[in-house]
């Protein structure tokens, strides 16, 4: 094969019709001139203010991943690291301390103290949370290891629930299974570990968009349970509810709390962190 004059042995694996990896500037066969960081003369990408391979487009923010699969990255908001509940408040009495107990590296539901929620508020976000149902099995169906993870909660509504439940050899109604968008969609699979074993949820939540009282875009949820996909950008019908199917009736808040449910079972949580999500180019 014949190579252009700029193509040396060190870059012959690169398509010579595109650019030379060892040259700071190269004119492709199509006539576009590439600088060190991209091009300034290509066509604009449809719907964007940027050209294809635009040299002026902002580079992605550098984020250091966690040390392991569930470790918090460098830009995460740490909501529970095993030490205290300073980031949480009581839902029964907002502004007062959460009544759950902290032991070792986890927090545990204390029956009757009520739900707890974060003091901080979030919109579009990525959530990581680990949970475990009691090792000693009591109850069946919805009475076994029941709790819930609620997103976009405020003083007027509980928001959007991803169900927490011991579903290891424990039949229940499908849209109330572990990982369900409660009362709306069952999970694609039952990924539950045995009672007492730690499990993980990784959730991507996109808030609904309203315009002058009209819903423009619904909420969307993606959920991974123990690394398995349960929901892939699933559209929510509205805020979740029990014994009802809620629709989008009134505007959701732009930001809301992360809420954890006291359903009377001593469910445990640990390693809770959140990343606010933004659009491309930091928008």
Image: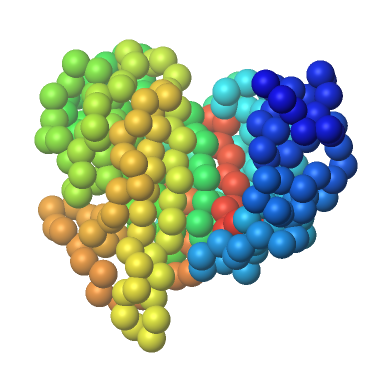
* Residue 236 found in image quarter: bottom left
Point out the residue furthest to the bottom here: 212
Specify the quadrant that holds the N terminus. top right
Specify the quadrant that holds the C terminus. bottom right
* Residue 182 position within the rendered picture, expressed as x and y whole percent measured from the top left: 24, 46
Point out the residue furthest to the right here: 24
* Residue 255 position within the rendered picture, expressed as x and y whole percent measured from the top left: 51, 65
Q: Nearer the viewer, residue 25 or 249?
A: 25
Q: How is the image coloured?
A: rainbow
* Residue 81 position within the rendered picture, expressed as x and y whole percent measured from the top left: 64, 33
* Residue 105 found in image quarter: top right
**How many numbered marks does the figure carry?**
0
* Residue 66 found in image quarter: top right
Residue 51 lies, with reference to residue 191, above or below; the image says below
- Residue shown at 34%/73% (left/top)? 216
**Left or right: residue 53 compared with residue 223:** right
Point out the residue furthest to the front here: 2
* Residue 16 position within the rendered picture, expressed as x and y whole percent measured from the top left: 70, 33
Query: Can the viewer see residue 113?
Result: no
**Left or right: residue 107 compared with residue 41:** left
Q: Nearer the viewer, residue 54 or 179?
A: 54
- Residue shown at 66%/31% (left/top)? 15
Query: Can the viewer see residue 150?
Result: yes
- Residue shown at 23%/55% (left/top)? 241
Residue 265 lies, with reference to residue 37, above or below; the image says above
- Residue shown at 25%/18% (left/top)? 168
């Amino acid at each position: 094969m014949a190579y252009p004059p700029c193509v040396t042995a060190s870059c012959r694996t690169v398509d010579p019709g595109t650019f030379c990896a060892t040259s700071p500037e190269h004119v492709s066969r199509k006539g576009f001139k590439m600088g060190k960081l991209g091009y300034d003369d290509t066509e604009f990408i449809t719907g964007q203010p940027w050209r294809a391979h635009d040299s002026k487009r902002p580079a992605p923010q550098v984020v250091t991943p966690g040390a392991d699969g569930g470790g918090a990255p460098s830009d995460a908001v740490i909501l529970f690291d095993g030490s205290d509940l300073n980031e949480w408040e009581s839902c029964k009495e907002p502004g007062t301390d959460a009544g759950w107990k902290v032991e070792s590296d986890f927090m545990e539901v204390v029956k009757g103290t009520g739900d707890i929620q974060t003091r901080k508020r979030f919109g579009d976000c990525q959530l990581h949370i680990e949970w475990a149902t009691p090792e000693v099995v009591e109850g069946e169906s919805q009475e076994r290891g029941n709790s819930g993870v609620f997103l976009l909660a405020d003083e007027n509504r509980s928001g959007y629930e991803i169900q927490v439940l011991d579903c290891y050899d424990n039949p229940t109604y499908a849209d109330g299974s572990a990982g369900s968008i409660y009362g709306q969609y069952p999970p694609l699979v039952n990924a539950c570990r045995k009672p007492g074993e730690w499990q993980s949820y990784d959730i991507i939540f996109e808030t609904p968009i309203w315009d002058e009282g009209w819903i423009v875009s619904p909420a969307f949820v993606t959920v991974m349970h123990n690394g398995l996909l349960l929901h892939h950008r699933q559209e929510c019908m509205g805020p979740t509810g029990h014994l009802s199917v809620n629709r989008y009736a009134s505007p959701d808040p732009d930001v809301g709390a992360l809420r954890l449910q006291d359903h009377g079972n001593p469910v445990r949580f640990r390693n809770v962190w959140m990343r606010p999500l933004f659009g491309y180019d930091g928008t």
